[in-house]
Image (cartoon, rainbow, N blue to C red):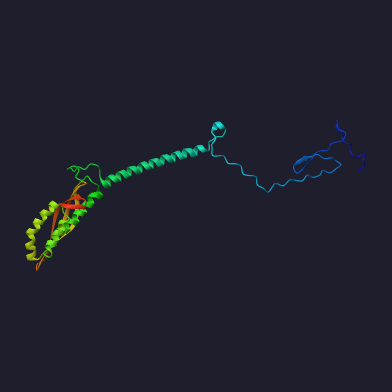
Amino acid sequence: MSDQSRPPRRPVGGSRNPVSRPRKVAGRDVPGTPDEPLEEQPVEEPSSEEAPPAEEPDGEELSPEAGEPLAEDEPSRSGGGRRRVVLVAVAVVLAAALAVEAWYLYGSSDPVVSAERPVVTGKIAHRSAVESAARSTSEILSYGFEDFDAQVEDATTKMTPEFAAEFEGTAADVKDRFVEERITQEIRVVASSVVTASDDEVRALLFLDQYVAKAGEGTSVTPYRAVVTVKRSDGGWLVSDIETQ
C-alpha cells in the first residue's frame, strides 16, 4: 500500500509527537509508541514465603458500641445460660433424692418409739439388730446334756448382765432333766421381723422351730414364736429378754 492511500494521522493539539494508545501488558496499561514495540515488563512472581499470620485478638469481645456486632455470640451465651440452669436443677433433684434415701436408710432424728410410730430407726439399722437377735437366740437356746455348763456359760456372753443372771437360774432348773434323759435341744429361726426399734433397743418377732432329741425316742419338732429384745452395747447387740409365745 502506498503512502498516499494511508489515512493521515490525526494530530493531537499541544503535542509535537503523536501518542499511541496504551497497551496492556501483564494486566497493566503501558504507554508505547507506534514505531517501537513495547518492552514487556517482567511479572513479579509471588514470594514463596508465607505472610506472617495475622495476630489473633486477645480474647476481648467488642461490644456493639465499639462497632462489632455480637449477634453471632448471643445464641451461644443464651445456650450456656440454659445449660447452667439445667445443671443446677439436676443438682437440686439429686440432693433431694440423697436426702430421702438417707432418711429411709438411717431413719429420722426422732428417737421416741410410740404406738403410732414403733420404728424410728432406718431399715439397715433395725435389720442388723433383728439379725443379731435371731442369731443370738438360736445359739442361746441350743444346748444339750453334753457340756451343759460350758454351753450355758457361752450363751451368757450374748446377753445383758441382768438377763444372764436370770437365764443361769432357769438353766440350773432343767440341767438335771437334760442330763438324765440325755436331751439335746436345737433352735432354728424360720422367719423374723421387727416389732419396735430405736437407736438403743430393738424388739424382734422370731418364728422358731425347736428340735428336741431324746435317747431312744428320736427327734420331735415344735414350732413356736418368741419376742426377743436386744440392746445396743459397746460390743454390739445383747439379748435382754426372750418371751416365748
Determine whether, in the image, residue 132 is placed left or right of residue 2. left
In-front residue for pair 117/165: 165
In-front residue for pair 8/185: 185
In-front residue for pair 148/95: 148
Picture quarter with the N terminus = top right
Looking at the image, residue 227 lies above or below residue 74: below
Determine whether, in the image, residue 228 is placed left or right of residue 17. left
Give x and y (percent) for residue 155: 15, 58
Residue 211 sits in which quadrant? bottom left
Give x and y (percent) for residue 153: 14, 59
Residue that appears at 8% across and 64% down: 179
Residue that appears at 41% across and 42% down: 87
Residue 147 sits in which quadrant? bottom left
Determine whether, in the image, residue 171 is placed left or right of residue 70. left
Give x and y (percent) for residue 70: 53, 36
Give x and y (percent) for residue 28: 76, 41
| Residue 185 seen anywhere in this rendered image of the structure | no
Determine whether, in the image, residue 162 is placed left or right of residue 30. left
